Image (spheres, rainbow, N blue to C red):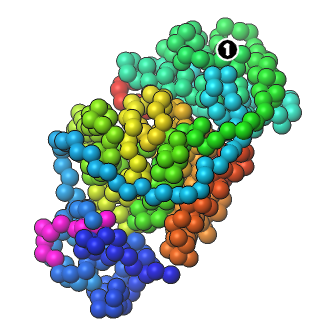
Amino acid sequence: MLKTVRLNDKDNVLVALTDFKKGETVGEGSLVLTGDIPAGYKIALEALPAGTSVIKYGETIGFLTEDVVPGDSVHVHNMKTGLEGKEEYRYRKVAKEVFHHSRPLPEVSLFRRKNGEAGIRNELWIVPTVGCVNGIAAEIADTFRESFDTSGVDGVHTFSHPYGCSQLGDDHERTRVLLQNIAVHPNAGGVLVLGLGCENNQIGVFRDTMPEGWDPERILFLEAQAVDDEMEKGVELLKQLYDRAAEDERTPGSLADLNIGLECGGSDAFSGITANPLIGLFSDYLTENGGTTVLTEVPEMFGAEHILLEQCADEAVFDKAVAMINGYKDYYLSHNLPVYENPSPGNKKGGITTLEDKSLGCTKKAGNSAVVDVLKIEDRVSAKGLNLLASPGNDIVATTVLGSAGCQLVLFSTGRGNPLGGFIPTMKIASNTGLMERKPHWIDFDAGRMISECVSRGELLDDLIDLVIDTVNGRPICMERWKRRDIALFKTGVTL
């Protein structure tokens, strides 16, 4: 097992890959540690005065606040971010080496919807238009499961949320559009849209403004106040949807037919070394073979956005990416909040010191492919290749937005562990083997084997591709086995 790593020849710190005690020797044998160093933490390679740039991944991740000597720990106690405010950017496309994998894109089995989109699950969903009917939606689903054999579909789920009323302007429109995007998602064989009747998010407007190509035989609507017994009517409509969905069959397709989301949550210092680069390799592999990936969590691009901007396919895409980055900075500033209030306590405990440190690791999920499009938070994917999608870093919001954009599956890396499940399959990829061993009921894949077993990146990529194939073909992942399904809708304005 490797014990330390210097991630780039330019780096002036090592990263500890295991716990060390004061006085131990690391590196090439000449670096004596001046204190205990936990796994994932940084070690100064040389004497550095206060104010010096700390270099990791070959990039500046912040500045020292005090002098350090060789063997010192470099972390929050002696280092700070170098980021502040907004920046100006100039278009400069940089061609980057893409890891070419010789494996042909495998065939998979998919549910082909009437509009041509492909689903990897065939489920029944109840989508409330307003939080007031969350309980009714759950009761309808429970009654239906108790009354009928539901083995003809992959599951019956409801997606609770607190919005749909007392919202104005952008929040009102965004709530409606995100819920509509969920309703037309191809992982659902049938959807019951459930409203109350007096909410802002009216069923009639919702139905009349649905995205083009929606199937009225697969999406039905119920207004609870308009019927005497909403439970009886809801179960009746769900049975109609079930009878149609139960006839659906998988047909041959390709991974290139899918949109796969790229996300992380509960990151540690290993995330940028193992799991995120592995996801980046998968993204390059899929996009090179005609598929589509989507990277989100804009605040976790801050400090590394220059790398993504250099990958933009052309100046038009670059301009959209800059607008996305600066738009999120304006969002923070308009609320008189710091732009760079990150990383989280768990990130820091896992060895991540500054937002630059976090972002440079997070953005490795994008790989080296060209960015072909930049999507607003309510947009749906239309361009094949690597897309950027506007969303905050909040894990549940980001997962919801990826699904709303049309992703059928999310690859979700984590170093600290995260059990959440979105409304689409959310595959957890551990950055370290210890997490996999502690939380096998949370974690689907161990990218930490890159360190713990010295498994090559090519072999790990093959293993990840195999797991993705099995998942697409219907094998449940952890969040599905534990029936974890959540959505969270992004909100910026007032509540009436």
**Residue drawn at (69%, 51%) of the image:** 470
Height in image: 46 above or below 359? Answer: below
Figure label count: 1
Residue 134 makes an appearance in the image? no
| Among the 4 quarters of the image, the one containing residue 173 | top left
Q: In this rendered view, identify the residue nearer to me: 197 or 54.
A: 54
| Residue 147 among magenta residues | no
- Residue 128 image offset from top left, x and y in percent: 60, 24
Of residues 90 and 406, the one nearer the viewer is: 90
Range shown magenta: 48-57
Residue at numbered disc 1: 216
Q: Residue at x 33, y 57 (%)?
A: 360
Percent from the top left, x then y, of residue 322?
26, 37
| 349 relative to 481 in the view: left or right | left
> In screen coordinates, is 402 left or right of 48?
right
Image point 50% across, 21% down: which residue?
176
> Is residue 49 rendered magenta in the image?
yes
Q: Residues within 10 Å of mark 1 (few under 14, many from 20)?
A: few
Residue 371 at least partly seen? yes
What x and y, as percent, mark residue 270?
44, 66
Can you tell which quarter of the image residue 309 is in?
Answer: top left
